[in-house]
Amino acid sequence: MSDALTRPQTCDAQVDATGLNCPLPLLKAKLELNRLASGAVLKVIATDAGSQRDFRTFAKLAGHTLVHEEAEDGVYQYWLRKA
């Protein structure tokens, strides 16, 4: 499910939420997004399978853009652009 064309080459901040279960990956991402300027890109790395649904829903509800997501070997990566 990797697509190097749409994966952002850079990010403004990164959150490592590996080993954390719902809702902690999302909470850590929210806290980091609060620190970033509008338009900044946050990369999140998680291992919780439920994070896929959580990040898709969160992006829609909060108005952020889920620029790209990848899932490989139980590791989920998300790139969110702050609204």
Image: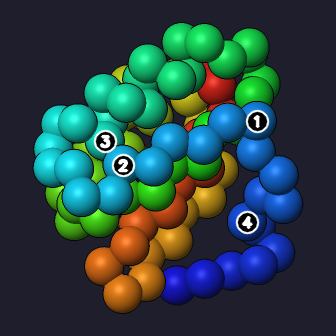
Circles 2, 3 touching at the beta carbon (< 8 Å): yes
Q: Which residue is mark 2?
A: 17
State which tag comes first along the sequence, 1 or 3: 1
Tell me the kind of residue under disc 3: Pro
Badge 1, how many Cα within 10 Å: few under 14, some, many 20+? few
Identify whether 31 is placed above or below 1.
Answer: above
Would you name the residue on which mark 4 appears? 7
Label 4 CA crowd tier, 10 Å (few <14, some 14–19, many 20+): some
Q: Earlier in the sequence, mark 3 or mark 4?
A: 4
Label 1 and label 3: CA atoms lie apart by: 18 Å
Determine the secondary structure under disc 1: loop
Residue at 36% x, 87% y: name it. Answer: 73
> Circle 1 sits on which residue?
12
Seen in the image, is 57 located left or right of residue 82? left
The amino acid type, in three-letter code, at marker 1 is Asp
* SS assignment at label 2: strand
Q: Residue at x 77, y 25 (%)?
A: 39
